[in-house]
Image: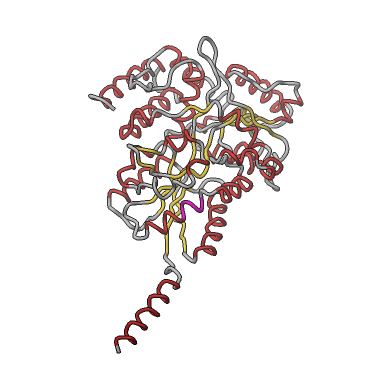
Amino acid sequence: MKFLTAFLAFVTGIMLAAAPARAVELSIVSGDTGNGIKVLREILDRYEKKSGNKVDIVVIPPSTTDQFGQYRLWLAAGSSDIDVYQTDVIWAPQLASQLVDLTEATKDVVAGHFASIIKSQTVNGRLVALPIFTDAPALYYRKDLLDKYGLKVPTSWKELADTAKLVTDKERAAGNKDIWGFVFQGNAYEGLTCNALEWVMSNGGGGIIEPDGSISINNPKAAAALDMVKGWIGTIAPPGVLAYQEEEARGVWQTGNAVFMRNWPYAYALGNSENSPIKGRFDVAPLPAGTGEGARPVATLGGWNLAVSKYSKHPDAAIDLVKFIASPEMQKYRTLKTANLPTIAALYDDPDIARQQPIVPRWKQIFLNAQPRPSSTARIKYNEASSQFWTAVHKTISGDGAAADNLADLEARLTRLKGKGW
C-alpha cells in the first residue's frame, strides 16, 4: 500500500510538472493615435498564439494629458482591471511607486536598449518600465512645393515663416485657397509643452527648469520665442491650430493643406500610405533653430514604454507580455509597420528596416538633437509644472497677455510649486 501511494504521488508530480501553465486574461491600456492600436493588436495576436494567454486592449483618447489623469485614477483606486500600462517617457517618476520593479526580470534584455532610455525609466534603482519605441519630432515639408518655387528647406524659424508665407501666397493666388503654411500642436496639453520647449530652447531661452532645479523660463529669449509663435497664428498657421493635437495637425497635413508640419515619426508612414494624397511628395528635416546666441535645433525627447501595475492579478504573465512586445522582433515589426523609432540600437542597422523604412536610419540625426523635458528634475511635481507652462504658453500665443508678463507670472507659480524643493 505504501508503495502504491508513493507511486501515485510520483506519477501525479510528473503530470503536474508537464502540464502547461494555465492561460490567463490580461489587459493593456493604450492611447489611440494613427494606426498604433491596429499594429498593437497584430503584435498581441502573435503573443496570444505563442503564450496561450488572451489580451484585451483598453483604448483611451490620444491626449497624453487625459491618459495620465486616467492612469492616476486607476492606480489610486488599486484597480486590477489594467495589467499593463503604456507610459510616456516622462511619467516614470510620478507613477513608480505603483508599478512593478522589472529590474530582475529584464536583466537579460536591457543591455540591448539605449542606456539613456533605460535610465529615464529607472527610479531609485527600480526599472519601472521597459521601452518599446522612442520618439523625436521632425519638420515635415512638402518637397514638391519647395521644388516648384526653387526654395530650400528652412533651418531657422524665421526662414520657415518666410518660406511658408511665400508658398501659401503663391498657391492661394493660383486657386489653392485651403493651404496653410505650418501646422503643429497648439492645444493646451502636454503636446504644447513639447512644442514650446523646442521654440524656447532653440532660441537660447533655457529649459524651463534646469537640471540644478532652478527656474529659468522668465527671460527675454523665451519671451521672444513665444511672441514669434503668436505672430504665426492666423498668418502662416490656421487659427484652429490653437486646438490641434497630433492627429488634427496630421489631418490638415495629409490632405495636402499645409506646407510644413511639426510631428512625430508615426506620421511619416501614414503620409506615405497607399491612399494618402501626399504620398511621395514630402520629406523630413530637423526642426529649425532660433536666432542669436545659443540658438540651435531642438527636438523634444518622446517615447513610449510598458509598465506592469503592482495591482495586477497576473504579474508574471504581464511581465512576459511586456518583454514580448519590447523584444527586438516585435520592435522591428512595429518599425516596419509604423516607422516608430526602435529603442534597440542594433535595429538601426537592420537591412529590412533600411530598405522598407529608410527614414528610420536617417532619423538618428534628429534623435541626436533630442532634449528631455524636466521631468527628472520636477519629479512628482512635473505634471503640475508642465500644466502651468503650457497654460502660460497657450495664453500668450492666443493673444491673452504679453509673453513677458505671462512668463513672469509663470515663474512665480513655479516658485510656489517648487516650495522647498522638487
Horizontal side of 32 relative to 261 (left or right) equals left
How many badges with numbers are in the image? 0
The residue depicted at 40 percent of the width and 40 percent of the height is 65
135 in relation to 31, above or below:
above
Q: Front-most of 236 and 265?
A: 265
Considering the image in quadrants, where does the C terminus appear? top left
The residue depicted at 35 percent of the width and 43 percent of the height is 69
From the top left corner, tell me how far across and down residue 284 is, in percent.
Answer: 65, 31
The residue depicted at 29 percent of the width and 86 percent of the height is 2
Residue stretch in magenta = 321-325
Q: Residue furthest left?
A: 420
Quarter-wise, where is residue 379 in the image?
A: top left
Q: Residue furthest front?
A: 3
From the top left corner, tell me how far across and down residue 14 is, in percent.
Answer: 42, 75
Q: Front-most of 122 and 308?
A: 122
Horizontal side of 372 relative to 262 (left or right) equals left
From the top left corner, tell me how far across and down residue 107 is, in percent.
Answer: 44, 46
From the top left corner, tell me how far across and down residue 352 is, in percent.
Answer: 69, 45
Quarter-wise, where is residue 351 in the image?
A: top right
Magenta stretch: includes residue 397 = no
Q: Front-most of 321 and 417?
A: 321
Quarter-wise, where is residue 26 in the image?
A: bottom left
The residue depicted at 76 percent of the width and 26 percent of the height is 148
Q: Which color scheme did the rendering employ for the protein?
A: secondary structure
Considering the image in quadrants, where does the N terminus appear? bottom left
Name the dominant secondary structure of the magenta segment: helix
Q: Residue furthest bottom?
A: 1
